[in-house]
Amino acid sequence: MVINILIIIIISGLLGYIIYLQIQLLKKNLFIESVIKRLSGIEHSTSIDEMIAYLQNIKKDSRNRFFLKRQFLDDSSINFILEENRNLKIYMHYTKEENVALSILKDGFKFASSLYKTALPVSKDKLDMTIKHNSRKLFGEYIIIICISKEIVDFYSMELKKASLKNYSFENLLTEAPPLQNEDSELIYLLAPQFIKGYIFRPSGEIIKNPSFDPYYNSPVFMRNIELLKNLNNI
């Protein structure tokens, strides 16, 4: 008998709480309607439901923008990446180990055949950067920033064209070490360390700069690499 009474009391309490919540929701909706009417002055041209839907879309859009911001980097990191972006070709590469990041700063960046296989080109469009970041962030928390001047890119792209080396790109020339073949018979290149700006440790936002960074670096070896590629092409 006592148990039945307790159950009845609990159920009654829950029903009362549900009724209370419904009343509060109704009051909130009535308040929103009155505010919309007072502020908009368009109660005769637009329905309240349409206005509420519009406000909900604004709220949803604000949440999406907040989500995108939280998913990427802070302003100091973005500024570090995009600094002098008008004059530079900029790329991001992700790695999991700090010792690998430090090695890249010291020795240069290894890549197979093309830089684009493991490094993402970056634009000043933050949405584009965020999408690319989200597609690669699982590859590691250390973000390597690679910068090459557009002058260097344009010059060596033209030199390759003059030499009729159609299967190569400018980055294949920007190495002071001869390319090596891997087990898949792909050529492995080592981009000169001068083109490595530094790296960002994403969780903390810490930025490690490369003291030897020079995006305009132009070694005499780069021109000699054209003849090397010609010889490789004839093998």
Image: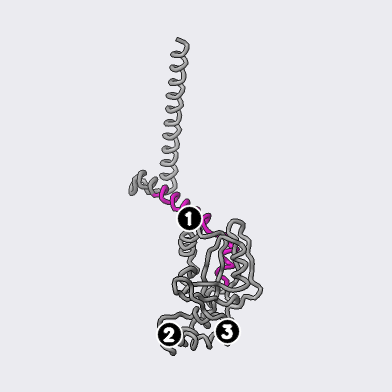
Image coordinates for residue 213, horizontal then vertical, percent: 62, 75
Which disc number belongs to residue 235? 2
Identify which amino acid the numbered label 3 is placed on. Answer: Asn
Secondary structure beneath label 3: loop
In this rendered view, identify the residue nearer to me: 1 or 76: 1
Looking at this rendering, what residue extends furthest in the front direction?
Answer: 183
Question: Is the residue marked by circle 3 packed among few (<14), some (14-19), or many (20+) residues within 10 Å?
Answer: some
Q: For mark 1, does the 10 Å Cα neighbourhood hold few (<14), some (14 to 19), or many (20 or more) residues?
A: few
Q: Position of residue 218 (x, y in %)?
A: 57, 84
From the viewer's perspective, is 46 left or right of 76?
left
| Mark 2 or 3, nearer chain start | 3
Amino acid type, residue under disc 1 in the picture: Arg
Q: Which residues are magenta?
A: 54-83
| Residue carrying label 1 | 65
Q: Is residue 166 left or right of residue 206?
A: left
Q: How far separated are the C-alphas under marks 2 and 1?
A: 53 Å
Residue contact at pointers 3 and 1, CB within 8 angstroms? no
The kind of residue on which mark 2 rests is Ile
**Number of the label disc, if any, that sits on residue 100:** none
Per the rendering, the mark at residue 218 is 3
Q: Is residue 78 magenta?
A: yes
Q: Residue at x 41, y 34 (%)?
A: 26
Q: Main secondary structure of the magenta part?
A: helix
Separation of marks 3 and 1 at Cα, in angstroms: 41 Å
Q: Residue 220 lies in magenta, yes or no?
A: no
> Distance from label 2 to label 3 (Cα)?
28 Å
Report x, y in % for residue 106. Answer: 63, 72
Q: For marks 2 and 3, give the one nearer the viewer.
A: 2
Residue drawn at x 44%, y 74% is 185
Q: Residue shown at 47%/11% (left/top)?
A: 2
Q: Residues within 10 Å of mark 2 (few under 14, many from 20)?
A: few
